[in-house]
């Protein structure tokens, strides 16, 4: 079936108006993921932009057509484990899903997620990575990349943006030996859609999907560039698109001829102050990671 | 105190937020130019691009006017309608 | 005490505008206090901010329910927000609009100051940044804070282009008495 | 038909819960609660019990797992102590405001620093304002019985609040004594099944849990929460009476008076220390001193009315606290008792503190407390600061 | 030479702390505290301040980083709100029992559930028994001034306890007003450097911190902790007076009386709501009603003696709580006030509750409270349950 | 210098008598590590056996000759970050060290550790992995291996020991891109000693050393077999000894000819109930991990 | 009420021994309660446990400070622990030892029951597991709980070998009056 | 209350626990058999094997008698001294 037809056959589970910024590709990712996961789904949206934009609802109204709730910033995965275990116990097959920011996943809720991964709990954990705490105004997260301006790694005489590299969350989750790990990008929709569809079929452990998103408000670029930005992220190898299915690595989008990293970095404000040295460090990081990944895909594919 | 029918914070009815009035100008597809590549459909954050009977069109109700569809349409088939 | 309620949209600078007014009041030797209504609005959603100015220390720390002045930075808000609710008798409306013809102005408002800030903003900035223009209109229409101090702070926060905008608003605001009000200064 | 078993407190709690058949259990080991978790796991491994056990990586996750399970509709059970309780404090507080009837034993342990593992209810008392019901018990039989009653109280439609059964680490958790274990079927008849509708995550009945909520709604939910606390007072008494009728053991509901009819002097107690206080009361009575005892069982909700009734027109009172209220230089129960009795004519009331971090509160110390109460009743002095009960035995 | 700046509460706190020159700062962003962290980071980035900032992955780590830094000898500073405070509860409690003079602002925010981000001191009041000093302030000037005083109080050799400066989220954190900012040098002269010896991890003076400790020692440390709390009362007053003499602003130490000399009726307040209560008091006074106000500044230690003195021989009292005590069906401050005044002859005292989750406590509501106090003074009835102050303005 | 001479030149920093079980090789590991790290060291020993055996002290006495403290079970790394940052600030070079169990590291304190790793804080974190919570009586941890009996994964009609694999902590830490990661075994002392000596020299980020220990009391084997057991662990490839120095993988003990896994498994009680299937699963896990490791060492060495 | 204090080393089963005594007491129709002193001793360190037996419900939940009976499972403890502290007048010592000659027995102890449990244990188990032997001696020497019930529980927990040990202790214990005590039963 | 010189839980003097009395039998190296391979030295958990002037010997003070050195000595140079 044609993508548009297939997607049109899925209902949008999110209420029609949510207050995400105009052009937000996290909204796009969330709507798409939940559309595919469908009505037999319970979804957790922790504090963060997607919770803040009223996707959980307002006052005595709900924001979705499926059961949705706010976990704490720090316990998304464990709350989901509890839900899933009960449904398994009573013999009902329900998609138990997180749609959580990088702050909620890579920082404050990381331990809960790591614990669920180790136990092999059969939840679908989707992390939307916009590289910072956007809901509170763009502070650094462990997923913020080196050199990035954030309001807690500001630029000034004594500071030049974030001083450490982005935590390599996808690889760390892969090393948890979970059932299925994948990265995805809203710029590569068919791939993203396939991965969510795949996630639905996994019944023997934890699924972790890491979506490389961007943020018009925080990163500083015009709203219409929302897809272009993340596409550049992928094309520059900054956001590698791969999956690890029960231990087997596979590169899904092979970037044979990357665009210059600067094409990506210079398209937004948060990097506008980068020094030569920072750019080099970022380039080295990207090159090393890419090399490692390629190797893993070759040998463990 | 505002009373609800619930004893703790739950919500059952769907909350509708009128994000349609965020946009400055309506966004419209020029069906003549459209080559049905589905990019606008794939990338619209608010799922305002609909696909019905082989045709793509924009439902303005919740479209925020972000311009993503315009930017991503390689056939330049979409644009703001700025005229007064 | 003068109480002001500012209505705008997320990203339009309503909150900073309220802070500039307080800055000016304090520098003028008065007391001032302001705070935003904190919803969870992202870029584009309606926001509001509250300002108080007085000769004495301002003690209440609550929203402004009965403003002496309502400032509307984005005219499209009129359709979704009741910007006039609770306005005191004989209060002032400062609004970004081409014309007030189509606006239903309630009785309590006796003075309206308006300026086509959208159009002017396109001229000055090439995009929609109406807030300093409306701020200029406010300063002129109310005379509650000094133009110099407002301009000083505007310059510090937003730079010279905005001074141009501020001056534009100050100089081009149209002030009319309505509902039988008398323009008292 | 019940039968007598010889059980330590942790084992009694595990069996009590076992009889109530929780669906999902998640607990993280910590001294002195650990054996409870182990008994439980063994019962499940042996197929005696078919609860689903989740093994979390911390207490924070333990409470979070149960929050999720309860939201899905499960009957849930757990236990913790001291540092574990502190670590789960964020989801702990939230479980009550979400109105989830989770049953959690708190095996009371002193809070560090200093590094300690021994008994004392500082842990649960410090978090008494997080919206949970809290019941404190005196011996292993009461542990078992209250673990049964707990589900019925918490899940009652007029309550729907989580509940703590608090028992002293080591003094009860590791103390072995004879305990009557009721029959599974009798317990099943006693506790109705849990069928939540007030909040439930189920694709068949979609709802949002915890939308972003403005203050006017929030205030309404708070009011309902406090009302549920009020209702709990009634429900705890009813459940107590029903239990007494069915199983033959009466705990008197919120507070237990001991020799209070004609008492001129009163000791107020909480938890396992009540035992030696009872002995001291008996010894004093033998000497003709009209002393009685009020054992507080229910600390949340605070049984203000009952306490006012029991403490009215006495000559002097001593409150025995195995914990401190840092900012009051007394114990926490003392501070609450004073608050409750503020409408009574003021009588000398002594804030006794002792037995912290594994120190015994011996019968001798309880007798010392009674003597001190008599003394202040005579000289009318009113104490403001902790009077320490120091155990020098065995030194 | 001080100078006037126009600052919101978070900015005032950041500048207050900046003037005290903390060595190590670690904070995790949370609404409404976030801007404080951001101001701080920017000052450091700009080289205005040379604190070492650590960016933790959660509040639990924020407090843990500071605990470590303080143990190494650093002057430390942080801030949090609601869920963040709950998440760090375990290391929070421990910082006090380790006697580490950490300064932490709590930008008061209502506790979820329901999901909320708005103001209210439920967060800090719930953990009031964790051994920290807690000061509640009324406006931005007081935020700044108390952030300076805080270091001096906490690090005082007779105190050595961590301290919270608590201010209402949004009402103060996001409210902008004129604030006098003292001169860096004056502040430096005011606060002596921090040179810990009571506990310090340093290879040059090796010691064990927190060995496994039996109860008899633990009790001794608890006694010293409570004594330090007592000492803090004196020190807070002394530092207040010294500050007043040097900087010209007097906050009256533990509690601030307002129009209390001849007051027959009293409102007791805490935090930013005091402002509208003052106005209501003035309005009532204009009508000839002899009403006064007691603003509690220091909640831990609880200023029992001061409150007893101020509330003695009044006709009726109203306590305004922007929080609830679930188990008492009142507010928390009410419950504490009742405890403190239990030796006074009982007068009608009303537990007002309102302003939760971002609801305003307007001057009208404060006037309503005063009327209600007059009413019960007349009919002598004593309220037990929260009297809700509901804001219907703007509805 | 001869090993015995070199080691004799280092003073033992731990008090002479600590109450670890007779034969405990965690005691051996701790004494050895701290001996090498020496007097210019501050050490955290979180709750766990090594804290419980009074290495932090008793009442008003200390258990060590260097500054030592109990962090919480869940905040070892962040407390160390605070200490280190202050010493860096005042310009003193001090070894800031954790000696922490697997429970404190892989479970309750994992997030704090992950955060410190991402920030690149220069602490030396040694995890002694005895595959369970021994201090509280051997409950399962995330580091307990599949099939192992523990008191919370007991053996009975409905349960056959732990149902999920051991979390691969060394690899997860390596994927945090820390300065230096190494595994070690008390059976391979010169290697262990070299790694601690190396750790002392690292100044540009976090050091994580994972020591594969065993536990006579919990695992169920006679105390004198303490070294034999862990040697078998290494020789069967169950406990691979390698290091990752600034991203470079190196296998330090290449086991060309592994002993049968059963030789290891059958030497203790905790595995005595293992089924054929469990043994196969364990064998597969070991084989896969070894293969992956070898590859990484070849390609990223 | 009878109060017993048991001294052993970590791993020797002192705590379980105390529980067996309570089990027997309860089965005998009396009340019993016990709990261990919880230090942090691993295998080998000194441990103790406390037991109470009474006709009435046992209410105190504290250590036993004034035992009627002191049980010493490991004789080497005598050099490091004051096992006699607080012993009541006319109390009983039950001890694992070859001979009591070298033991300084304080005045309060008026009866001593001893058995060479180490030697017997090597015979029965081939290694050092003295506790059930000492338990047997205790049952015989005090007669506070019934041998049958002790044996029933010992069997359930530790199996048949230990019954042999229990019987050995019961049958081979040497009971002597000391300090002028009179062996009253 | 037991008083200490400290205001919070710290310890300065070294705590000495006599673990030497845990062992059933003393452990001794037979210097004749010893080939100085250092295994006992490397593996003794209590660091009771000392190396002085080229000779290994066991300091009994804190030796718990675990037997690791005995087990690991490939020359059978170490053993318990069980004789009475
Ligand atoms: C314990 C706790 N600390 C802090 C917060 C405040 N907070 C809410 S959202 C958020 C950031 C979330 O970041 P992320 O998960 O990346 O989502 P994003 O906002 O980027 O969508 C923070 C720090 C909180 N809710 N709970
Ligand atoms: C928050 C918290 N929960 C639980 C405990 C109880 N506890 C103390 S040690 C320990 C296990 C430690 O295991 P590990 O780190 O592997 O060390 P080991 O005992 O194996 O040496 C636990 C669960 C605690 N101290 N703190
Ligand atoms: S701030 Fe960024 S992530 Fe958040 S809604 Fe706006 S664009 Fe999306
Ligand atoms: S992107 Fe343009 S061409 Fe493609 S379907 Fe949309 S309108 Fe048509
Ligand atoms: S402008 Fe944006 S919201 Fe509107 S249809 Fe196009 S992509 Fe969708
Ligand atoms: S229980 Fe195991 S790890 Fe702990 S001290 Fe004993 S042997 Fe060592
Ligand atoms: S192990 Fe044996 S041979 Fe080697 S040094 Fe020791 S005693 Fe000598
Ligand atoms: S027996 Fe054990 S403790 Fe003693 S010297 Fe040998 S290895 Fe060391
Ligand atoms: Mg984010
Ligand atoms: Mg371990």
Image (cartoon, coloured by chain):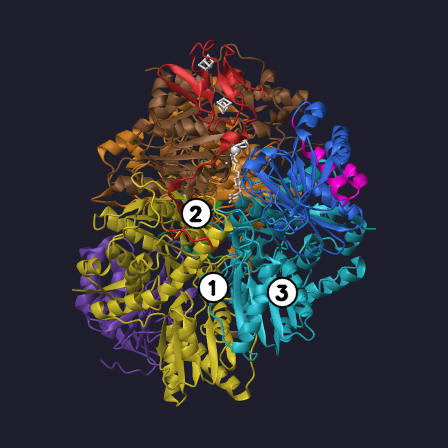
Chain colours: A orange, B green, C purple, D cyan, E yellow, F brown, G blue, H red
Identify which residue, B16 or D63, lies in the foreground: D63
Point out residue E348 in the picture as x, y percentages from the top left corner: 52, 81
Residue A77 marker = none
Secondary structure of the residue carrying tag 3 is: helix
Same chain for mark 2 and mark 3? The answer is: no
Name the side, left or right, on which E176 lies relative to D11.
left
Residue C14 seen anywhere in this rendered image of the structure: no
- Vertical placement of residue E208 versus H67, above or below: below
Mark 2 near mark 1, Cβ–Cβ under 8 Å? Answer: no
Answer with the quarter of the image where residue E292 lies: bottom left
Q: Is mark 2 within 8 Å of ligand 1?
A: no
Point out residue H7 in the picture as x, y percentages from the top left corner: 38, 53
Answer with the quarter of the image where residue A85 lies: top right
Name the side, left or right, on which D250 lies relative to F86.
right
Work out how far the residue at label 2 is from the one at label 1, CA to CA, in angstroms. 24 Å
Name the subunit of mark 1.
E
Residue D102 seen anywhere in this rendered image of the structure: yes
Residue E357 marker = 1
Residue D228 marker = 3
Mark 1 near mark 3, Cβ–Cβ under 8 Å? Answer: no
């Amino acid at each position: 079936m044609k993508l548009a037809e297939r997607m049109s056959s899925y209902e949008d589970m999110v209420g029609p108006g949510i207050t995400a910024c105009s052009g937000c590709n996290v909204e796009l990712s969330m709507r798409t993921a939940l559309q595919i996961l469908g009505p037999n789904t319970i979804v957790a949206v922790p504090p963060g932009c997607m919770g803040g934009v009223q996707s959980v609802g307002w006052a005595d109204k709900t924001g979705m057509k499926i059961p949705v709730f706010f976990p704490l910033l720090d316990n998304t995965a464990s709350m989901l484990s509890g839900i899933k275990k009960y449904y398994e116990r009573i013999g009902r097959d329900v998609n138990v899903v997180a749609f959580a920011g990088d702050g909620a996943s890579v920082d404050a809720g990381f331990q809960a997620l790591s614990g669920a991964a180790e136990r092999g709990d059969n939840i679908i954990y989707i992390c939307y990575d916009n590289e910072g705490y956007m809901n509170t105004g763009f502070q650094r997260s462990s997923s913020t990349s080196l050199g990035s301006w954030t309001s807690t790694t500001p630029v000034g005489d004594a500071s030049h943006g974030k001083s450490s590299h982005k935590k390599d969350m996808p690889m760390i989750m892969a090393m948890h030996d979970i059932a299925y790990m994948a990265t995805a990008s809203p710029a590569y929709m068919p791939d993203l859609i396939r991965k969510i569809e795949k996630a639905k079929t996994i019944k023997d452990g934890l699924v972790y999907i890491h979506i490389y998103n961007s943020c018009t408000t925080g990163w500083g670029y015009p709203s219409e560039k929302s897809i272009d930005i993340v596409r550049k992220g992928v094309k520059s190898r900054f956001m590698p698109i791969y999956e690890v299915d029960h231990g087997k690595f596979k590169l899904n989008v092979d970037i044979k001829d990357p665009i210059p990293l600067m094409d990506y970095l210079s398209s937004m404000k948060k990097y506008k102050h980068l020094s030569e040295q920072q750019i080099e460090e970022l380039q080295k990081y990207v090159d090393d990671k890419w090399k490692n990944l390629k190797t893993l895909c070759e040998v463990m594919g | 105190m505002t009373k609800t029918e619930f004893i703790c914070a739950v919500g059952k009815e769907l909350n509708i937020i009128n994000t349609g009035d965020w946009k400055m100008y309506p966004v419209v597809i020029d069906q003549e130019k459209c080559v049905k590549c589905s990019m606008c459909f794939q990338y619209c954050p608010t799922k305002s691009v609909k696909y019905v009977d082989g045709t793509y069109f924009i439902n303005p109700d919740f479209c925020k006017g972000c311009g993503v569809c315009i930017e991503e349409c390689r056939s330049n088939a979409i644009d703001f309608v700025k005229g007064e | 005490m003068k109480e002001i309620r500012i209505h705008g949209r997320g990203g339009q600078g309503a909150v900073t505008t309220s802070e500039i007014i307080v800055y000016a009041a304090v520098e003028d030797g008065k007391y001032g206090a302001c705070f935003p209504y904190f919803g969870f609005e992202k870029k584009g959603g309606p926001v509001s901010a509250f300002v108080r100015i007085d000769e004495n220390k301002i003690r209440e720390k609550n929203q402004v329910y009965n403003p002496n002045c309502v400032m509307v930075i984005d005219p499209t808000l009129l359709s979704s927000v009741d910007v006039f609710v609770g306005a005191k008798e004989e209060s002032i409306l400062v609004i970004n609009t081409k014309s007030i013809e189509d606006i239903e102005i309630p009785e309590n408002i006796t003075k309206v100051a308006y300026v086509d800030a959208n159009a002017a903003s396109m001229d000055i900035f090439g995009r929609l940044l109406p807030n300093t223009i409306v701020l200029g209109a406010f300063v002129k229409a109310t005379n509650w804070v000094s133009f110099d101090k407002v301009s000083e702070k505007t310059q510090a926060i937003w730079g010279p282009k905005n001074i141009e905008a501020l001056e534009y608003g100050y100089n081009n605001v149209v002030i009319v008495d309505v509902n039988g009000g008398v323009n008292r200064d | 038909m019940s039968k007598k078993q010889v059980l330590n407190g942790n084992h009694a709690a595990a069996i009590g819960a076992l009889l109530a058949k929780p669906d999902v259990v998640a607990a993280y080991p910590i001294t002195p609660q650990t054996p409870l978790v182990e008994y439980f796991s063994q019962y499940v491994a042996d197929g005696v019990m078919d609860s689903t056990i989740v093994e979390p990586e911390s207490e924070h996750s333990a409470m979070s797992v149960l929050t999720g399970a309860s939201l899905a509709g499960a009957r849930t059970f757990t236990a913790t102590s001291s540092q574990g309780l502190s670590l789960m404090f964020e989801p702990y507080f939230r479980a009550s405001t979400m109105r989830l009837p989770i049953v959690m034993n708190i095996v009371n342990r002193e809070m560090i620093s200093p590094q300690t593992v021994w008994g004392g209810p500082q842990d649960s008392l410090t978090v008494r304002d997080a919206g949970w019901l809290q019941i404190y018990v005196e011996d292993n039989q009461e542990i078992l019985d209250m673990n049964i009653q707990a589900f019925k109280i918490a899940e009652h439609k007029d309550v729907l609040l989580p509940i703590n059964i608090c028992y002293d680490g080591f003094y009860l958790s590791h103390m072995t004594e004879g305990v009557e274990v009721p029959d599974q079927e009798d317990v099943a008849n006693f506790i109705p099944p849990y069928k939540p509708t007030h909040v439930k995550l189920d694709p068949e009945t979609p709802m949002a849990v915890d939308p972003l909520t403005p203050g006017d709604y929030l205030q309404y939910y708070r009011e309902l929460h406090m009302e549920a606390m009020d209702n709990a007072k009634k429900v705890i008494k009813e459940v107590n009476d029903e239990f007494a009728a069915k199983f033959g053991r009466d705990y008197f509901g919120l507070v237990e008076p001991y020799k209070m009819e004609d008492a001129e002097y009163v000791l107020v107690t909480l938890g396992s220390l009540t035992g030696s206080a009872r002995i001291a009361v008996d010894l004093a009575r033998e000497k003709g001193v009209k002393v009685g005892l009020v054992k507080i069982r229910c600390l949340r909700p605070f049984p203000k009315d009952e306490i006012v009734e029991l403490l009215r027109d006495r000559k002097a009172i001593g409150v025995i606290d195995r914990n401190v209220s840092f900012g009051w230089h007394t114990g926490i129960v003392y501070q609450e008792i004073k608050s409750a009795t503020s409408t009574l004519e003021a009588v000398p009331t002594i804030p006794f503190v002792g037995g912290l971090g594994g120190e015994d509160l011996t019968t001798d110390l309880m007798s010392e407390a009674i003597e001190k109460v008599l003394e202040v009743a005579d000289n009318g002095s009113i104490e403001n600061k902790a009077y320490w009960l120091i155990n020098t035995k065995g030194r």
